[in-house]
Image (spheres, helix red, strand yellow):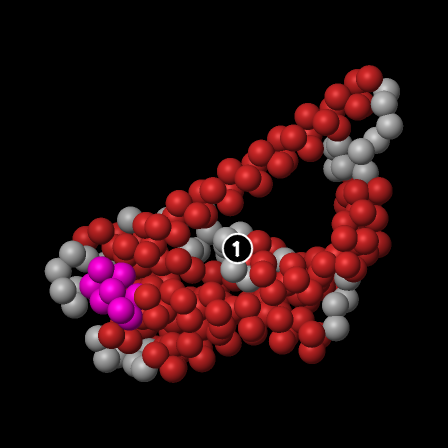
């Protein structure tokens, strides 16, 4: 996750950040109001390095300054989340199972059986994964792709994505509104959460690779 440090310059009351991702998001909101916050969140879904934990509290801060209402911020950011998620769902649907299997077969250490297991897992837990995945950095975006590959029913996908996104967005916008010019404090805390998630993912990947290499070298059964 690429966290923006530009907000550190905004230490005075009612002072908005300039420069970097926070400055870019501020400019969007100054120009387009709450709709600009929605645009920023839609792009955050498509490009996960754009951190929602910067954009959303900043939207709450802007609302506390009277630039737009909290209701408008919640509506447009949730709509932006859904639009971004739909774009990635479409990517997964266009990719489809056959192409996914073909790509997996070309990747080192990845087997087609891994795709089969993933499909079975998604069939059992896909609804929970889409809902709760909207509240986990990085996975917020990526969970939409397997949902598209597996052709999860669009009404179900939209309902789960909207509900999960609304909860995530509301928490950060309301905290940003309450903190005002100290909105960046929540970003600092969630940055630790994001780093923890990335550490767990990295450890899981390293463990998978180590086990697969070991089994390959010993001629044991594939994982």
Residue 57 x/y as whole percent: 33, 64
Residue 77 x/y as whole percent: 44, 73
Q: Residue at x 69, y 74 (%)?
A: 156
Q: In the figure, 38 relative to 2: above or below?
A: below
Figure quadrant of residue 72: bottom left
**Does the magenta run of residues contain 125?**
no
Residue 191 x/y as whole percent: 39, 48
Q: Which of 189 and 202 is in front in this view?
A: 189
Q: From the image, tell me which residue sits under label 1.
A: 136
Q: Which residue lies furthest to the top in this view?
A: 218
**The C terminus lies in which quarter of the figure?**
top right
Per the picture, the main secondary structure of the magenta-coloured stretch is helix
Residue 145 x/y as whole percent: 67, 59
Q: Residues within 10 Å of mark 1 (few under 14, many from 20)?
A: some
Q: Which residue is drawn at 55% across and 39% down?
A: 200
Residue extent of the magenta highlight: 176-183
Q: In the figure, 130 relative to 221: above or below?
A: below
Figure quadrant of residue 134: bottom right
Q: In the figure, 146 relative to 159: above or below?
A: above
């Amino acid at each position: 996750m690429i966290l923006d440090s530009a907000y550190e310059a905004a230490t005075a009351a009612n002072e908005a950040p300039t420069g970097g991702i926070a400055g870019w998001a501020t400019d969007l909101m100054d120009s387009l109001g709450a709709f600009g916050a929605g645009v920023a969140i839609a792009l955050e879904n498509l490009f996960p390095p754009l951190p929602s934990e910067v954009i959303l509290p900043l939207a709450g801060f802007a609302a506390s300054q009277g630039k737009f209402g909290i209701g408008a911020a919640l509506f447009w950011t949730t709509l932006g989340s859904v639009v971004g998620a739909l774009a990635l769902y479409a990517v997964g649907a266009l990719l489809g199972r056959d192409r996914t299997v073909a790509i997996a077969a070309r990747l080192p250490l990845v087997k087609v059986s891994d795709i089969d297991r993933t499909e079975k897992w998604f069939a059992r837990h896909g609804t929970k994964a889409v809902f709760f995945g909207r509240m986990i950095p990085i996975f917020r975006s990526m969970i939409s792709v397997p949902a598209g590959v597996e052709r999860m029913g669009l009404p179900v996908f939209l309902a789960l994505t909207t509900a999960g996104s609304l909860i995530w967005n509301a928490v950060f916008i309301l905290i940003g509104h309450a903190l005002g010019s100290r909105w960046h404090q929540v970003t600092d805390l969630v940055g630790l959460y994001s780093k923890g998630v990335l550490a767990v993912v990295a450890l899981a990947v390293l463990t998978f690779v180590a086990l697969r290499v070991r089994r390959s070298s010993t001629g044991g059964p594939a994982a």
